[in-house]
Amino acid sequence: MEIQSAVPAIVTRYTITSANDVPERDPKNWKLAGSNDGVNWAILDSQVNQSFASRFLTKTYTIDSNATLYTYYRLTITANEVNFNISNALNGLYFLHVTDGVEKAVRIIVKY
């Protein structure tokens, strides 16, 4: 899944939500990447062997090492338990946006 931000932003954290019905559809391994041209991607975060204790459980993942503004973001699920539907997993991206020297947390809502 790829998302284009209205303005370049520094991602500081993002959330993933478990599937609504069965654990077999939950994401297990994934990578979050950023890009400014939609072609060349930098890995911002990767997770392995993640599990969710309940349905609709939202977990937050923090990215401490990113200091680069990106316009495009890509979430790639590399493993799940069985048949994973990404529309049940990506809840949103939070990023840091600087306007007039003031840092503001902004959330990208993903709609399907």
Image (cartoon, rainbow, N blue to C red):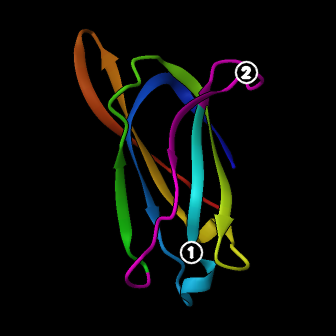
The circle drawn on residue 84 is none
Identify the residue at horizontal 32%, vertical 18% (top origin).
Answer: 98
Image location of residue 16, percent across then percent down? 46, 61
85 is higher (above) or lower (below) than 5: below
Task: Check if residue 42 falls in the magenta segment.
Answer: yes
For this rendering, which residue is in front, 33 or 100?
Answer: 33
Where, by quadrant of the figure, is residue 21 drawn?
bottom right
Where, by quadrant of the figure, is residue 70 drawn?
top right
Mark earlier in primary sequence (1, 2): 1
Where, by quadrant of the figure, is residue 79 drawn?
bottom right
Identify the residue at horizontal 78%, vertical 23% (top origin).
Answer: 39
Indicate the secondary structure of the residue bearing disc 2: loop
For this rendering, which residue is in front, 99 or 86?
Answer: 86
Pick out the residue farthest to the right. 39
Identify the residue at horizontal 68%, vertical 56% (top origin).
Answer: 78
10 is higher (above) or lower (below) than 15: above
95 is higher (above) or lower (below) than 16: above
Kind of residue indicated by mark 1: Asp
Kind of residue indicated by mark 2: Asn
Residue wearing tag 2: 40
Image location of residue 77, percent across then percent down? 66, 56
Indicate the secondary structure of the residue bearing disc 1: loop
Identify the residue at horizontal 51%, vertical 64% (top origin).
Answer: 49
| C-alpha distance separating marks 1 and 2 | 28 Å
Question: In the displayed structure, does residue 38 sit left or right of residue 67?
Answer: right
Image location of residue 33, percent across then percent down? 59, 35
The circle drawn on residue 26 is 1
Q: Which residues are magenta?
A: 34-55
Image location of residue 101, percent across then percent down? 24, 9
Magenta segment's dominant SS is: loop
